[in-house]
C-alpha cells in the first residue's frame, strides 16, 4: 500500500484499492477514519497479514499529513479519529477498501484451482478476492 501511494504521488496514474483479512485495521482506517492502535490480532487464513497495527500505517499517515500530526495520533493511543483533512487526502488517493473473510479466501483458492489448476499465492490472493467483491 505504501509503495502504491508513493507511485501515485510520483505521478503514476493508478487507482488504489485496499483489501485486508479479518485483521481489518487498514479497512477501518480507510472506510471509517478510525485507527485502533491496540487491537488484538486474530489468526486468519492469510497469516502474513495477521497484524493488529501494520507498520506502514504511520508511513501512510505521514504521506498525507506531517510529522507533528502523526506523532500526535500515535501518542494518543487506543482508538483515534483521524483528522478530517488527513482522511480526505487519503481517500482521494486510496479509493476504497474491503475486508475479506477466511471463507472468501478459501473459496477463491478452490475456485482458482478448479478453473485453472492454479494454486493461488495467499499474498496475491487479495487482488483476486477484491475483484470478486467489486462484481
Image (cartoon, grey):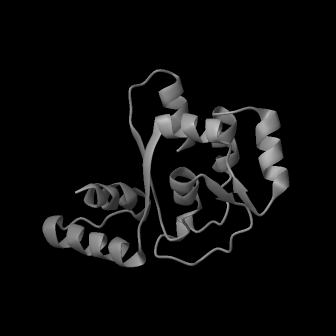
Which residue occupies the foreground of this view, 132 or 113?
Answer: 132
- Residue at image position (49%, 29%) is 7
Q: Position of residue 108 (x, y in %)?
A: 28, 69
Instruction: Look at the picture and state if 90 lies above or below 21.
Output: above
Which residue occupies the foreground of this view, 108 or 18?
Answer: 18
Q: Which quadrant holds the C terminus?
A: bottom left
- Residue at image position (77%, 64%) is 78
- Residue at image position (83%, 55%) is 76
- Write down the quadrant of residue 90 in the picture: top right
Which residue occupies the foreground of this view, 26 or 109?
Answer: 26
- Residue at image position (81%, 59%) is 77
- Write down the quadrant of residue 119 in the picture: bottom left
In the image, farthest residue toward the front: 84
- Write down the quadrant of residue 118 in the picture: bottom left
Q: Position of residue 48 (x, y in %)?
A: 54, 65
Instruction: Look at the picture and state if 133 lies above or below 104.
Output: above
Instruction: Look at the picture and state if 37 lies above or below 62.
Output: below
Amino acid at each position: 500500500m505504501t509503495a502504491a501511494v508513493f507511485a501515485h504521488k510520483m505521478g503514476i496514474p493508478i487507482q488504489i484499492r485496499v483489501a485486508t483479512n479479518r485483521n481489518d485495521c487498514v479497512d477501518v482506517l480507510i472506510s471509517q477514519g478510525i485507527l485502533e492502535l491496540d487491537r488484538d490480532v486474530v489468526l486468519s487464513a492469510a497469516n502474513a497479514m495477521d497484524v493488529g497495527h501494520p507498520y506502514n500505517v504511520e508511513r501512510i499517515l505521514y504521506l498525507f499529513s506531517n510529522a507533528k500530526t502523526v506523532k500526535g495520533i500515535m501518542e494518543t493511543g487506543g482508538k483515534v479519529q483521524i483528522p478530517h483533512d488527513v482522511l480526505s487526502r487519503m481517500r482521494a488517493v486510496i479509493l476504497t477498501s474491503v475486508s475479506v473473510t477466511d471463507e472468501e479466501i478459501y473459496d477463491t483458492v478452490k475456485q482458482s484451482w478448479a478453473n485453472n489448476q492454479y494454486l493461488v499465492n495467499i499474498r496475491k490472493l487479495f487482488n483476486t478476492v477484491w475483484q470478486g467483491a467489486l462484481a
